[in-house]
Amino acid sequence: MIRHNAAEPLYQQIRDLIRREIREGRYADGDKLPSEREMCESYGVSRIPVRKALELLEAEGLITSHQGKGSFVRRPVIRDRLVHISTFAQTLAQQGYRGYTKIISFEEHSYNTDSALLLQTDGCGVSRLMLLGYAEEEPVVFYDSCLQKPVGLRFHKAAMAAEAEGEAFSTFDLYGRTMTTIGKVDQRVLAVNADARISSILQIPEGTAVLVLETVILDESMRTVEYKRGYYRTDKYSFQLHRSL
């Protein structure tokens, strides 16, 4: 709803309205927006604020305009820079997305032998926590974490609280919530084709390429406390890094 008597300029209101409609999925990637004339009639404004709003949206990378053809939606992927570790919520917020995380499952006793060896559990056991991160209302990343059992129990409790609060989070956020100190983080990026399980969770066709961020987190004593695989939709997410010559 455009408020003609509001202090906020008309072009900003129009920009915010169209931006929200794009974020919420009213327009898919590549969809054509209504013409300037149609927007003027719909919002009850002149062409000047409409054109200014479209210019701002194009500068943000949300649309692309073609002379004589109109303006088209270009939904940007979520970009995560691999220079510093950032939380899922921070990554979303930096690019104007709202999000939340759901717990897919928690196994207090996991029987993943490979993870038990990697985590150096000394008999304390392994827990498994699976999370699904959403941007707006779309699933964009699936986190599958194996943790030392005492850590896993704390993380599950913290995850339930964060989920109840409607927060966007990954296990990285849970270290702060549980006062668990991180000593070192090792990561590598892989690419795989989604199997039936991953495709079902991320709501993508089976065989679709997904990015995998494999993470090993060690505590202050350099003991491995978590082994995690994050599966990222390539149509919604990308990783960026800067390399020096």
Image (cartoon, rainbow, N blue to C red):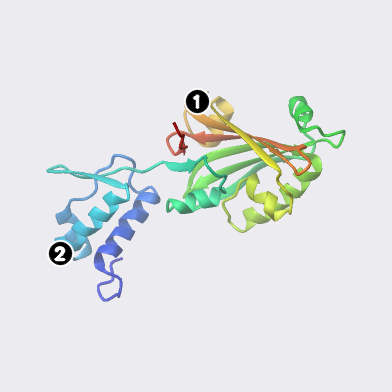
Residue where numbered disc 1 is placed:
206
Q: Give x and y (percent) for residue 2.
A: 28, 67
Q: Quadrant of residue 109?
A: top right
Give coordinates of residue 172: x percent, y percent: 64, 46
Residue 207 vertical position relative to residue 155 in the rendered view, above or below: above
Q: Is residue 84 visible?
A: yes
Q: Secondary structure at mark 1?
A: loop
Circle 2 Cα neighbour tier, 10 Å, few/some/many (<14 / 14–19 / ≥20):
some
Looking at the image, which residue is at 26% across and 76% down? 5
Q: CA separation, marks 1 and 2?
A: 47 Å
Q: Is 35 placed left or right of 139 in the picture?
A: left
Residue 193 visible in rendering: no
Circle 1 Cα neighbour tier, 10 Å, few/some/many (<14 / 14–19 / ≥20) = some
Farthest left residue in view: 68
Percent across and percent down for residue 220 are 76, 44
Instruction: Tell me which corner region of the image, top left, top right, bottom left or bottom right, holds residue 41.
Output: bottom left
Which residue is found at the position 48% from the left and 48% from the top?
A: 137
- The residue positioned 52% from the left and 52% from the top of the image is 90
- Quarter occupied by the C terminus: top left
Residue 14 found in image quarter: bottom left
The label number, if any, that marks residue 2 in the structure image: none
Q: Is residue 124 above or below residue 6?
A: above
The residue lying toward the viewer, choosing from 243 and 95, is: 243
Residue named by callout 2: 46
Residue 55: percent from the left, percent from the top? 23, 54
